[in-house]
């Protein structure tokens, strides 16, 4: 009886240890098949292109195809939710943004937790915004712009790419910091919003570098400040908000890569190394620079840095969104 009991306990212990052993073995041989990165925007969009540039470089590092799959809808919640439900084996990842991994948590009732249901892999890049206005707007600098808005409440119009977008929520923070009031005009996309700003049908907006640089250089709009700590190399003449008179008004659209929760640490480390190598690729760096994006510094390209950065962004933006009563339409 004692022998039988001892044998049973030995087999039971082996059965309990088997999943852990299996995970270790899987991590040691990873990857053995193609990896899918979910992009929550349609094919041909800026983030889709960025994802494909990263995927090609990561393929060379990982030795397996890295496939971009576009799963758009509900401001990215559908694609992110699919990754949250995926097996934690490193073969399904998500390329997320400020809206998908920060704002959506306050805008939607989500079937997943943005901090608890994902394993951070790495920050990728960030794109600051310009405070830009139509060419004929009666202010020549940021202080003058804020002064005009204060003297003319609820007259000016700010175009946004929709309710809950970075332009919308950033505009609310702008109102809070400057004690100004203006009207929000939602559009389906940033490009449509810019199309109405150039001819002066809209007064101002928060425009990313990719959308603002061309009309700025052609003289069709004016820029008051950049919503970042440092000036951009592509527009060295445009001051930061700190320099222009609105210190601390920082707004960036940033991106990162996540895996499902409980993905083995060895796999996360392998993926992080592939991302870091890709971000050091000259072709990848050139692509991001040409589109007005800044790659995060090397010491911020870690899982821990992404986790801390995302948490800080949630703590900053969720109270603003909730206090304004914004809900996704």
Image (spheres, helix red, strand yellow):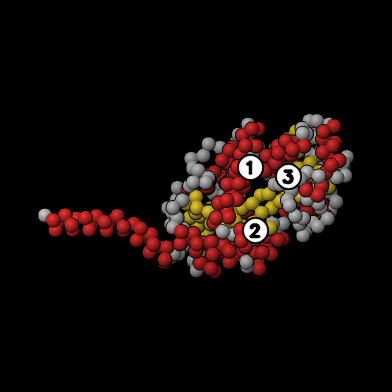
Identify the image quadrant of residue 233.
Answer: bottom right
* SS label for mark 2: loop
Q: Quadrant of the C terminus?
A: top right
Looking at this rendering, what residue extends furthest in the left direction? 1
CB under 8 Å between callouts 3 and 2?
A: no
Which residue is drawn at the image coordinates 54% and 43% (left, top)?
77
Query: What x and y, as percent, mark residue 106?
Result: 58, 38
Name the residue tied to disc 2.
Answer: 296
Which residue is drawn at the image coordinates 62% and 66% (left, top)?
280
Which residue is drawn at the image coordinates 74% and 38% (left, top)?
177
Query: What x and y, as percent, mark residue 64?
Result: 49, 66
* SS label for mark 1: helix
Mark 2 nearby-residue class (10 Å; few <14, some 14–19, many ≥20): some
Per the model, the C-alpha gap separating discs 3 and 2 is 19 Å
> Camera-side residue: 161 or 308?
308
Per the model, the C-alpha gap separating discs 1 and 2 is 20 Å
Identify the image quadrant of residue 31.
Answer: bottom left
Name the residue tied to disc 1.
Answer: 316
Name the residue tied to disc 3.
Answer: 249
CB under 8 Å between callouts 3 and 1?
A: no
Answer above or below: position of 234 versus 252: below
Left or right? Give the position of 254 relative to 238: left
Answer above or below: position of 234 versus 243: below
Left or right? Give the position of 251 relative to 16: right
N-terminal label among 3 and 1: 3
N-terminal label among 1 and 2: 2
Q: Is residue 242 visible?
A: yes
Answer above or below: position of 4 versus 148: below
């Amino acid at each position: 009886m004692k022998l039988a009991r001892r044998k049973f306990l030995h087999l039971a212990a082996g059965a309990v240890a088997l999943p852990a052993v299996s995970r270790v073995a899987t991590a040691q041989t990873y990857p053995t098949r193609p990896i899918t990165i979910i992009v929550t925007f349609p094919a041909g969009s800026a983030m889709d292109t960025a994802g494909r540039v990263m995927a090609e470089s990561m393929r060379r590092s990982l030795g397996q195809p890295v496939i971009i799959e576009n799963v758009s809808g509900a401001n990215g919640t559908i694609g992110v939710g699919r990754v949250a439900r995926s097996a934690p084996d490193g073969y399904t990842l998500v390329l997320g943004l400020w809206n998908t991994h920060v704002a959506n948590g306050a805008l939607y009732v989500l079937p997943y937790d943005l901090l608890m249901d994902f394993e951070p892999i790495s920050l990728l890049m960030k794109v600051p915004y310009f405070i830009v206005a139509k060419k004929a707007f009666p202010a020549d600098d940021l202080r003058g712009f804020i002064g005009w808005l204060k003297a003319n409440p609820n007259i000016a119009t700010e175009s946004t790419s929709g309710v809950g977008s970075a332009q919308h929520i950033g505009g609310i923070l702008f109102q809070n910091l400057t004690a100004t009031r203006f009207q929000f005009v939602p559009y389906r996309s940033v490009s449509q919003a810019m199309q109405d700003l150039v001819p002066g049908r809209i007064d101002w907006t928060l425009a990313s570098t990719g959308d603002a640089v061309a009309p700025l250089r052609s003289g069709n709009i004016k820029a008051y400040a950049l919503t970042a700590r440092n000036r951009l190399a592509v527009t060295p003449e445009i001051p930061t908000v700190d320099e222009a008179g609105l210190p601390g008004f920082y707004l960036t659209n940033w991106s990162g890569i996540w895996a499902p929760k409980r993905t083995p640490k060895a796999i996360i480390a392998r993926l992080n190394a592939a991302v870091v190598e890709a971000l050091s690729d000259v072709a990848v760096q050139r692509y991001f620079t040409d589109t007005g994006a800044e790659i995060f510094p090397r010491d911020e390209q870690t899982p821990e840095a992404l986790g801390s950065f995302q948490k800080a962004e949630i703590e900053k933006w969720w109270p603003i969104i909730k206090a304004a009563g914004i809900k996704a339409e």
